[in-house]
Amino acid sequence: MADHNDLIVVYVDEAQGSDLTGNGSIDTPFQSPVAALTAAGLHAMVHSRKTPNETYEPLGTSALKKAKKIVELNEKKARKADELKAKANAENAERSAKEAKRIEDSKNVVLEEDPSLPPAMKTKIRGCTSLRMKRVRISGWVHRLRRQKGPTFIVLRDGTGFLQCVLSDRLSQTYDALTLATEAAIQITGLVQEVPEGKSAPGGHELIADWWGVLGAAPSGDDAFSNRLNAESEGNVLADNRHLALRGEVAASVLHVRAGVLSAFRKVFEAHNLTEVTPPCMVQTQVEGGATLFKFDYYGQPAFLTQSSQLYLETCLPSLGDVYSIQESFRAENSHTRRHLSEYTHLEAELAFITFDELMTHIEEVICEAVSMVLAVPRLAAMLKQLHPEFQPPKRPFLRMSYKNAIKYLNEHGIQRKDDETGRFVDHTVGDDIAEAAERQMTDELGVPIFLYGFPKEIKAFYMKKIPGDEAFTESCDLLMPNVGEIVGGSMRIADMDELLAGYKREGIDPAPYYWFTDQRKYGTCEHGGYGLGVERFLAWLTNRYTVRECSLYPRWPGRATP
Ligand code: 4AD
């Protein structure tokens, strides 16, 4: 820009000037007259040129007029925007002040329980059905919260169920009501009433509150529960926040079903005359191969976390008769599959004086009876319906397929295995360990529970009894379920002392630490067999979960032992 007879002259080069970086001088001109007038004011003289070869000339009258008009319009718009912004700021400030006052005033709204009302009966949410039209006192956590102009609606959760609670008038005007956030723990009293026709609520009723109070507040804002965890949260976030994820409906339903399943199995075992025992978790013998042992130092001696309580159960037979245990088992498997945990709940049973056929029948009975028992509990049946709408109890008898026939099936259906050495896919041959993928494909194709039995002795544990007359194979069985694969592994056990000693030898196991297990064969040996069922795998099948990790309270897998 330059002064020219007291007037500011501002330069515009339509070809090479820039409205962004120009300043109106002859060296760094603007590109448009509008930018020039905006910067220098409406009274400035605009000298412009269309191409760099021309000399600068005063801008023509009509072009100047047009540019001035646009500048005036822009200025008007800017003024308007400033006005609006100022108004919005003032309104916001007023609203904030009002809200602050409302919150301040709310501290004066103090709720007292009305002593003229009948005493409130302390109950859990599940007890409300039988307490309709009675005054009750309930404590729980705010699962959902909806504030309306008048009342506040809370869906309360206490582990036994969900209850809609209505806070009206003064009850929704207290400081606690205004600052309430989901997951706060509260206590509430009021009348349980059937919901009006056309409205729905859990249990068909709602609590019309006459008093309430916060027992343990929860934060809102950045630290609000929904910011810690929500439907979009990724796997690692979910795993780190498992303690909070447990509060979700799906996780809680799976755990309720889990409790129902454990209770059902216990009842079924009792009905079948099996006695519960609790074997140790710290052991000095292996059961299922050294490769998956968690080893630790036990007062200077090597020890392991148990892989299976089977050997201990066997020792109980002459003392208690048939026995079972529900105990954690540990496997140091570096498997990141959806059916492997490093620690899992192992339901194991051992039965004396049975045949292999009786063992498989028993497993089938126990599973079917436990499933019907769970389905007979209306609350669990409802949860299962939500989790796994298509679930059908398995039909007996289960399909029984020998290992040899399974190999045939795989080859006839083009299900191949990957050869370790060549990396190529090849047909299965008798003697192969059927890999998880092949087993799963076959199970999913058949779509029913399958007892796969009679595995070669080389791929099975040292304690398994051989099939009389076909000694290269064992009286062993895996129960395979669609979508999950193996949920049970069982077998008849070697009853004969010499055969057992040969089994140790074959697997390269030192028999010395097994003296107590070997003694079983010395003092009144008997034909016996048993099995182990992975509780999380059973649940993954029953509740249709993608992974066993969802079926464990705090799952452990390689690299994960937190929370
Ligand atoms: O087939 P497994 O290894 O058999 C035994 O441990 C026997 N000693 C049991 C017995 O006869 N008493 O394991 C039995 C079951 C499997 O079928 C599977 O359901 C589960 O335990 N299981 C696992 N579940 C989750 N994660 C793992 N890493 C598992 N390993 C086995």
Image: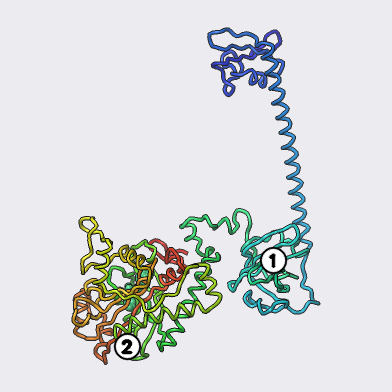
Residue 13: where, in percent of width, then height? 58, 14
In the image, which disc is placed on residue 316? none
Badge 2: few (under 14), some or many (20 or more) residues near its Cα, within 10 Å? some
**Which type of secondary structure does the marked residue at label 2 adopt?**
strand
Q: Residue at x 58, y 24 (%)?
A: 20
Q: Which image quarter holds the N terminus?
A: top right
- What's under tag 1, amino acid-wise? Gly
Structural distance between the alpha carbons of marks 1 and 2: 60 Å
Q: Nearer the viewer, residue 504 or 69?
A: 69
Q: Nearer the viewer, residue 213 or 203?
A: 203
Q: Is mark 1 within 8 Å of ligand 1?
A: no
Dot 1 and dot 2 residues touching (CB under 8 Å): no
Q: Residue at x 44, y 87 (%)?
A: 270
Q: Is residue 312 visible?
A: yes
Nearer mark to the viewer, of 1 and 2: 1
Residue 81: where, in percent of width, then height? 71, 33
In the image, which disc is placed on residue 352? 2
Horizontal side of 195 relative to 477 (left or right) equals right
In the image, which disc is placed on residue 198? 1
Q: Is residue 195 placed above or below 516 in the rendered structure?
A: above
Q: Quadrant of ligand 1?
A: bottom left
- What's under tag 2, amino acid-wise? Ala
Q: Is residue 144 placed above or below 348 in the rendered structure?
A: above
Q: Earlier in the sequence, mark 1 or mark 2?
A: 1
Q: Which colour scheme appears in the figure?
A: rainbow
Q: Nearer the viewer, residue 101 or 59?
A: 59
Q: Is residue 299 visible?
A: no
**Which type of secondary structure does the marked residue at label 1 adopt?**
loop
Q: Residue at x 64, y 72 (%)?
A: 203
Residue 255: where, in percent of width, then height? 50, 71
Q: Quadrant of residue 492?
A: bottom left
